[in-house]
Structure formats: C-alpha cells, structure tokens
C-alpha cells in the first residue's frame, strides 16, 4: 500500500517539477533557482501531507480506532440544531437592529457590501441553483437596476422607493428578453449566450455616452431616504436599515415560493 | 490607399485574427467533444504556452542561437511550449476534472472556472503583473499585395496555423487514436465496452487540445510582442464563442467559427463604429444559435445528453 | 446564555476596536490601488509617502507630535472600494490623505473625506471634476486632463504644424477625458481638423482593423489615448501596416516597458509628460527611495506621492495645527519646493504645472519641446 503511494509521490513530484520550475524560475532571463525550488518545495510538501493522510487513514490501526466515529463538525451542528428556529431568527433580528447603531462608517460599509452580496446570491441561487441554468451574465441585471435608479433620480428626481419596483421590473423585462431566445439552448450554449448578454449590456452602458456618460459613470444621485429620519444627513447608517428591511421581506418569499411550489417544476427542468 | 487595397488589407487582418481564434477554439471543441466539459482553463493554458515560448526564446537568444539556427529556434520554441502545456493539460485533467467525471455538470464547470483562476493567479505571481516583452524575431519587413501589407511574421503564422489544423484533422480521421477519440466522443460507455482505453483517450485529448492553444499563444506573443498573465481572458471568450458558433465538438466547425468571429470583428471595425464590435460579435453569436441551436456545423444532440 | 455572552463580547470588541485611545500621532492615510492591474503604480504611491515620512522623522519629526503614522488604504481603482477605504481611513482618525490613483476612485472617495473635512492630496488623478466641485480641502499634484490636452494641441499646432489629426481612445475615464479635451481645444483654435475618432477595447491585442481604417483616412498625426500595454502594441502594428503619420500619446504610456515591447517601432513616438527638474533634492530622494525599497528605479507616481506627503507635513508644521481649514490655507498660500519641481496651487487646488513633449529616441525618453516657451530642448 505505502509502497505504491511512494511511487505515485515520486512521479507526481517529478511532474510538479516539470510544471513549476520553468514557469516560476524564469521571471526574467535568469534562472531564479531559490524561488523556483521554494515554490516547488511547498507544492511537494502539501502533496506529501495529502498522501500521508491517505496512507494513515487506510492503515489498520487508524481504522480500528477511529472508524465510525462522528466527525466534530457533525456533532457541533447537532448541538446547534437543538435550539428552535425562532430563537435564531430573533437573535438575527436583534443583531441586525443593533449593528448600525454600534458600528462605525467602515463597518457599516462592510455590512452593506455583505447585504448586497446576499441579495445577489439569493437571485443567483434561483437561476443557477434551483433552475440549473448556468447564467454567466447574471451581473448584468445588477447594472440594469443600478442605472435605472441613477438615471431616473438624476433626470426626473424620482425617489428611491419609486425606482425600486421600476428597477425590479426592468430587470425582469431584461431577464425575459434574454430568456426567450436562450431557453431552448442546451446548458453550455446557454452559458456562453448569457456571458455574451452580460458583455453586451456592459458595453452598451459604456458606449452610450449621451445617456450613461460612458466610462465616467453617473455621480451625485440622492441616497435613499424615508420621510423621517432622512438619510441625506446621516447617510450610510440608515441605508443599511433599508437594505435590511427589504431583505427581511424577500427572505421568506425566497424561502417559501421556490421550495414549496415551483421547486418541482424548476428542478425537473434542470434535470 | 485605395478602396480595393483597403478591403484586401482588412481581409488579411481578419484571416490572421480568425486563424488564431480558430486554433484556440479547436482546443475547446476537442475537449468538449470527448467529455462534454467547457474547459475554462483553456485561456490560461494559452497564456502559459506564450510564457514558456518567451522563456525558451530569450534563453536561445542569449546564446545567439536565433541568428544562426532560425528554423531550429522556431521548432524548439513551439515544441517546448506545446509539450509543456500538454503536460499541464493532463495534470489539470487529473487534478480537476477526472474526480468529477461522474459528478453533476455544474460541479465540473465550477472546477474548471476555479482552475482557470488558480492558473491565472499562479502566472501573475510567477511572471509578474506587467507585460513581458517577446524578443523580436520577425522584423517589420513584409510583402505588399495590391497595396495591402503583410509582414513575414503574419504569413508564417497563418501558414503554421493552417498546417496545424490540417494535421489535426488528419490525425482525428485516420489514425487509430483519432478513431478512438471519435468513438469516445460519440458514446463513452459504448467505446469502453468495445475495449477502448477511455482514460488514455481522454489524456491524449488533453495533450492535443492545450498544445494547440499553446501554439496559438506563442504565435500571439511572437507577433504582437508582449505577454501578460491575464491576456487569455479575452481570447478565451472569443474562441469559446467561435467553438460554439461552429457547433461545439466539430473540428471544421471550430475553424469556421473562428474565421467568422475574426471576420465579423475586423470587418465591423473597418466600416462601422469600432466601439460596438464586441456587441456585434455577440449578437451574431446569439442570432446563429437562435436559428440553429446546435451551431453551424454541429450535429443535433438530443436533450437527454444535457 | 453562553452564546448570547459570546455575541455580546464580539459586539463589544468591534466597538472597542473602533474607538482606540489616540496618542499624539500625526496620521497620514493613503488611497491607491494595491491590488489589480494598476497595483504597480499604487505601490509606488504608498512607498513614496512612506519615504517622505521616514525623511521627516529622521530630520526630527514635527513639533507637537510623537510620531507620524502611515495608514495604507486599497482603492483598487474602483469607486465603491475606494469609498470603503476612505471610510476606513476616516474611522482610524487620519489627519490627511494622499490618494487616490484613478480619477474614477478619487471622485467618489472624496465625498466622505469632504464630509469629514479631511485634507486630500491626489498624486495622480487628472479628471477635471476632482477639483471642480468646490471642495476646499482637496489638492492635486499632477497636471489636469485639460492642461495635458492643451500641451498636446499646442505642440501639434505650433511644433509639428499638422493639419489633420485622428484620435484613438480605449473608452476609459482617463483617455476619454483626454480625447474630449483635445477635440475641444482643436475646435476652439480651428487650426487642426479632427478627421477620425476611433475606439479600442482595453485588453485587446489586435488593433489592425482600426489602424487600417486610419491609414485610409491618412491623417498627419494619430493621437493614441491608451495605456502602456495597448500603446506598445499599437505602435508596432502601425509600423507593420506602414502608417507614416506622426504618433503622439500621453503620460500613461510613459514607462520603460513601452520601449521594451515597442522596440524599434516605438522610435519617434511623441509623449506628453511632466518635465522633472534636475535638483539635488530629487537625487537625494531617488537615493533614499531606492535604498529603502530595494528598487531599481522610482515609479512615475512615487515623486508626486512623496511631494504630496511632504507638502502636507510641512504645512502642518508651518500652521502649527492639524485644523483642516488652516492647513489648507497654508498649502494654498505658499510655494513649496518638491522633487517634481516648484509646487504652487491655484484657488481650486490644482497645481500650476504643465507637461512638456518628449520623444522616444535611441531607446530612451528624451525631452523634445516645451509648450510654455515654444522652444526645443
């Protein structure tokens, strides 16, 4: 057992040497042996550890002593599952409510970025995860929403709350435009076509100078605000609340609609 | 510059660009034909080939080898780059794709994307963030055909890529390995039952496809004069589009697709506002796929294989 | 109960972390792309600032402050990330900020910095809007887009005496700003006719289609509003196609790589770049910088960043306070001696400095023509 692993190890190290030494060793015309062998050494070390792990796990001593024992992660998660879901939700809500009051600008910024990624991830999960459509141009819809609000706000002074549904609607319309011709395609064809659509939207936004100001981008749209307290002075902190509240509304929707009703349809299509 | 020579010049430009796209697209199409996986790391394999070419070429130039043995230099540069990238291709297949051969398609595609990011960052760390200059071995000298200029470097590259394409086609059609590859592409399980060594066939595919990409990489580096770690991305998108446009899995299709993409890109910039050229390329791709979902020369593949 | 305790502890730690006790330290923040394609220039900026701080501390520091601290921020040449980094700097209580690099990062990041009333000196952003919004605490070390465009047009009109000009840009903020301003000046003076405006995609390698188009139009000069990677490829392809027009380009191409990649084809290309004075201070700075960072040469923006940090620290010293309004007035009303020449700011915060024209000759950048005096070097 161990002997064949050793043979494999030597073979793999040799291949790693072929692959790593020239690429890492020649950042210029001189051969930088120290650098090349250091990188190679790290790779070989990781390889050795991996193989050692395998050999140990297959050894009889290990199997006699540790076989069948529940891994640590499983044990922790069973402990956590004992707490009812409503406590988790309550704790989450409390954390969400308190966070902007305690956090400084930078932490709020990070929080907002996290929340934006959460929204993006939720959407992507529907397209890729549930429907099984590999959409490589998903981010184009993000641009559609951003430009909708910015343009409407700058040109017509429309408020964030009015633009939010309009942006969502436009995103959905764009989704239909892309979806109609592409959905009859097979998986990988869909990937390249959505990637193409993503590029098209990006290029159109970058090239359409009159409307989008091209690469300079749009500046100076109003921050989202509600009647009181107004966001325009405090800025960031209140923005997290809006994002959070919108997420609190969307979460249950996303949790229930797909899994309960459409799940069957979408997932069957995906297969 | 008259109208005729203008059009001829642009056609030469298109042919040149198209043959490079075609060469890269062949790598996609071969891998896809066999294991139905988009090898996203192909763009990085192409860049790796260009880097190995630069390393070998500058080493040879240091010893003054280029002036004395010009043809041998070219052989060495292309040979080393293709061999290296062939090994890299097999290694990638072994590490990232083989364990996932029976997993879901999405898992394999994500593994390919991850491999692409890994390689691209690896090259960034090892070769630096700024471009590396290729030693100039083709000068600016060239021919003039009816007012259109072609440099000898361009002629060499177009001829070499045509030779590689024809050689590949002959290999796939007439050799035993090529037949095994085609059989595997048609039906992997049936081929296995008939006694074809599937793993070996896949490995050979992962040598040849990336090696062609490497040849394209060296050509790009030699002709344009610089290589950067992230240059594979744009070529990857275009070649990928070319492979799909021609019908993925079909070798003549990849060549045709590459020529179409190169042609659309150059001719659009030649007569219409150039900033919209990429938009047009993708619109052409989408239109073709809408009218013929399996690509121009692609065979109809039943839905069950998706 | 235990879990709640842990959560509470985490929250406490987070808040405690933000309100650390302040020693008597002068804090200078930097904003520059430390990751991404412009990481090289971004690192030059950070190193330039750190060099300035080391030089000042060695000379005895600033009276009233125990030490000077540099807090780096990564702007990544991206508006969102730059704003985040700026907020992070504000929270760590910086007194002044040097940065950012890309105009598209500087403009958004200057909004929170302006709200927090913190001095910002950009070493590299050339967009007109950086100083055109009436902010009182923002300064710029490098010449503005329209100043560079003005030098270019002046050189084309009076130096080269061309009649027709074709423009190429790669549709990024910086290059579009340049071609727009060149078009504006050319129209105003009405001596040069713009015969074509073409665009390329950054990252592309093949520009033959666009160049062939320009060959057909046959202008006297071609202006390449691109960055160095595309610029070096473009000169090669232009020469390969047999284009005879004069090639002129801007400071983003001014980099040794341009000549390395462009090779013989780069010869005779004109560039606009600020002329460096030949002073002992500059030599000293170069020596310190190269020794400190173990570098072969100083990046173009290292000089501006060093000057930016230097001016800020000198102004704090002179004003005897870190009060923003007073320091800003001190910066504005004095003339400073920097390694990039004499530094003077106008009302808006722009530096009074103009580009000169350089030429690539014998594999080197050589100064060629001065648009202010209309004389050859």
Image: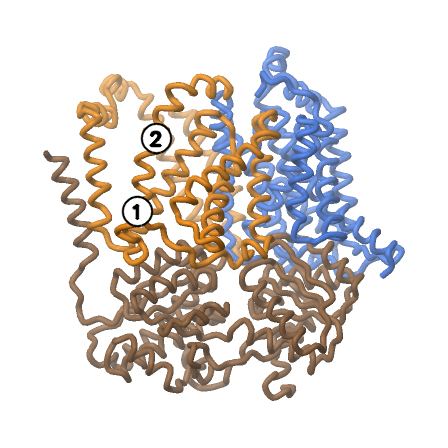
Chain colours: A orange, B blue, C brown
Looking at the rendered structure, the secondary structure element under dot 1 is helix
Is residue A70 at all visible to an observer of this figure?
yes
**Left or right: A171 as drawn, with respect to B278:** left
Residue B300, image quadrant? top right
Residue identified by numbered label 1: A240
Separation (CA) of disc 2 from disc 1: 48 Å
**Left or right: A250 as drawn, with respect to C232:** left
**Where C341 falls versus B245 (above or below)?**
below
Q: Which image quadrant: the C terminus of chain C?
A: bottom right
The subunit carrying tag 1 is A
**Where B108 falls versus C368 (above or below)?**
above
Residue C140, image quadrant? bottom left
Residue identified by numbered label 2: A52
Residue name at image x 45 percent, y 68 percent: C130
- The x and y percentages for residue C55 are 33, 77
Looking at the rendered structure, the secondary structure element under dot 2 is helix
In the image, C18 versus B129, the foreground residue is: C18
């Amino acid at each position: 057992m161990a002997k064949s692993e050793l043979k494999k190890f030597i073979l793999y190290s040799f291949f790693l040497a072929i692959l790593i030494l020239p690429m890492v060793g020649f950042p210029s015309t001189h051969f930088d042996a120290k650098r090349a062998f250091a990188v190679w050494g790290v790779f070989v070390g990781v390889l050795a550890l991996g193989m050692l792990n395998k050999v140990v796990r297959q050894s009889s001593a290990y199997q006699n002593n540790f076989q069948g024992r529940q891994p640590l992660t499983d044990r922790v998660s069973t402990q956590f599952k004992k707490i009812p879901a409503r406590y988790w939700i309550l704790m989450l809500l409390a954390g969400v409510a308190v966070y902007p009051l305690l956090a400084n600008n930078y932490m709020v910024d990070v929080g907002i970025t996290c929340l934006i990624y959460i929204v993006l991830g939720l959407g992507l999960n529907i397209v890729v995860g549930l429907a099984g459509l590999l959409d490589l141009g998903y981010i184009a819809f993000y641009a559609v929403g951003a430009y909708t609000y910015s343009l409407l706000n700058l040109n017509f002074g429309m408020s964030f709350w009015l633009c939010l549904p309009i942006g969502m609607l436009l995103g959905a319309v764009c989704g239909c435009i892309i979806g109609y011709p592409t959905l009859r395609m097979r998986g990988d064809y869909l990937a390249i076509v959505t990637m193409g659509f993503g590029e098209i939207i990006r290029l159109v936004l970058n090239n359409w100078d009159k409307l989008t100001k091209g690469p300079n981008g749009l500046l100076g749209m109003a921050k989202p605000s509600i009647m009181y307290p107004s966001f325009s002075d405090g800025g960031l902190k209140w923005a997290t609340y809006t994002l959070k509240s919108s997420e609190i509304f969307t979460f249950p929707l996303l949790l229930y609609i797909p899994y309960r009703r459409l799940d069957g349809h979408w997932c069957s299509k995906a297969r | 510059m008259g109208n005729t020579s203008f059009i001829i010049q642009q056609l030469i430009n298109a042919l040149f660009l198209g043959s490079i796209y075609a060469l890269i697209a062949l790598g996609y199409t071969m891998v896809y034909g066999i294991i139905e996986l988009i090898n996203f790391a192909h763009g990085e394999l192409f860049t790796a080939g260009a880097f190995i070419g630069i390393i070998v070429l500058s080493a040879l130039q240091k010893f003054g080898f280029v002036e004395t043995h010009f043809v041998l230099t070219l052989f060495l540069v292309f040979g080393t780059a293709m061999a290296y990238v062939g090994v890299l291709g097999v290694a990638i297949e072994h590490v990232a794709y083989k364990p996932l051969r029976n997993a879901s398609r999405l898992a394999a595609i994500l593994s390919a994307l991850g491999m692409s990011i890994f390689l691209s960052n690896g090259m960034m760390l090892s070769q630096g963030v700024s471009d590396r200059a290729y030693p100039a071995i083709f000068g600016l000298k060239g021919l003039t055909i009816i007012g259109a200029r072609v440099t000898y470097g361009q002629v060499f590259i177009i001829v070499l890529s045509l030779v590689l394409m024809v050689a590949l086609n002959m290999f796939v059609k007439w050799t035993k390995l090529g037949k095994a590859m085609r059989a595997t592409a048609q039906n992997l399980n049936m081929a296995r039952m008939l006694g074809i060594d599937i793993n070996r066939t896949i490995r050979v595919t992962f040598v040849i496809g990336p090696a062609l990409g490497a040849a394209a990489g060296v050509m790009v580096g030699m002709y344009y004069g610089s290589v950067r770690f992230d240059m594979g991305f744009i070529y990857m998108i275009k070649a990928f589009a070319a492979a799909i446009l021609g019908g993925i899995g079909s070798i003549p299709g990849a060549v045709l697709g590459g020529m179409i993409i190169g042609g659309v890109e150059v001719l659009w910039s030649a007569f219409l506002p150039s900033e919209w050229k990429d938009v047009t390329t993708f619109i052409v791709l989408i239109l073709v796929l809408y009218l013929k979902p399996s690509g121009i020369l692609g065979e109809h593949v039943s839905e069950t294989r998706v | 109960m235990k879990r709640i305790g842990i959560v509470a502890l985490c929250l406490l730690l987070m808040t405690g972390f933000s309100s650390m006790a302040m020693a008597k330290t002068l804090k200078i923040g930097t904003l520059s792309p430390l990751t991404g394609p412009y990481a090289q220039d971004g690192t030059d900026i950070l190193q330039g600032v750190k060099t300035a701080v080391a030089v000042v501390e060695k000379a005895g520091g600033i009276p009233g402050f125990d030490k000077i601290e540099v807090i780096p921020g990564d702007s990544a040449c991206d508006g969102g990330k730059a704003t985040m980094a700026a907020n992070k700097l504000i929270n760590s209580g910086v007194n002044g900020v040097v940065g950012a690099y890309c105009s598209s990062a500087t403009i958004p990041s200057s909004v929170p910095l302006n709200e927090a009333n913190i001095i910002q000196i950009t070493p590299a952003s050339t967009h007109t809007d950086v100083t055109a919004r009436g902010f009182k605490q923002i300064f710029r070390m490098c010449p503005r887009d329209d100043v560079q465009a003005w030098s270019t047009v002046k050189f084309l009109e009076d130096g080269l005496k061309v009649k027709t000009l074709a423009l190429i840009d790669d549709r990024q903020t910086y290059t579009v700003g340049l071609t727009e301003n060149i078009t504006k000046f050319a129209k105003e003076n009405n001596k040069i006719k713009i015969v074509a405006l073409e665009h390329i995609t950054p990252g592309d390698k093949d520009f033959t289609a666009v160049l062939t188009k320009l060959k057909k139009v046959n202008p006297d000069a071609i202006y390449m509003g691109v960055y160095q990677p595309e610029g070096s490829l473009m000169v090669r392809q232009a020469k390969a196609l047999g284009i005879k027009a004069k090639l002129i380009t801007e400071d983003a191409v001014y980099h040794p790589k341009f000549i390395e990649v462009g090779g013989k084809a780069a010869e005779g290309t004109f560039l606009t770049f600020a002329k460096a004075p030949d002073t002992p201070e500059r030599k000293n700075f170069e020596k310190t910088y190269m020794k400190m960072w173990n570098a072969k040469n100083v990046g173009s923006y290292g000089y501006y960043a060093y000057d930016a940090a230097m001016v800020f620290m000198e102004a704090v010293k002179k004003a005897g306070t870190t009060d923003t309004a007073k320091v800003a007035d001190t910066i504005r009303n004095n003339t400073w001696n920097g390694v990039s020449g004499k530094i003077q700011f106008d009302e808006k915060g722009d530096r009074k400095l103009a580009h000169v024209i350089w030429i690539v000759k014998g594999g080197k950048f050589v100064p060629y023509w001065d648009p202010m005096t209309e004389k050859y070097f």
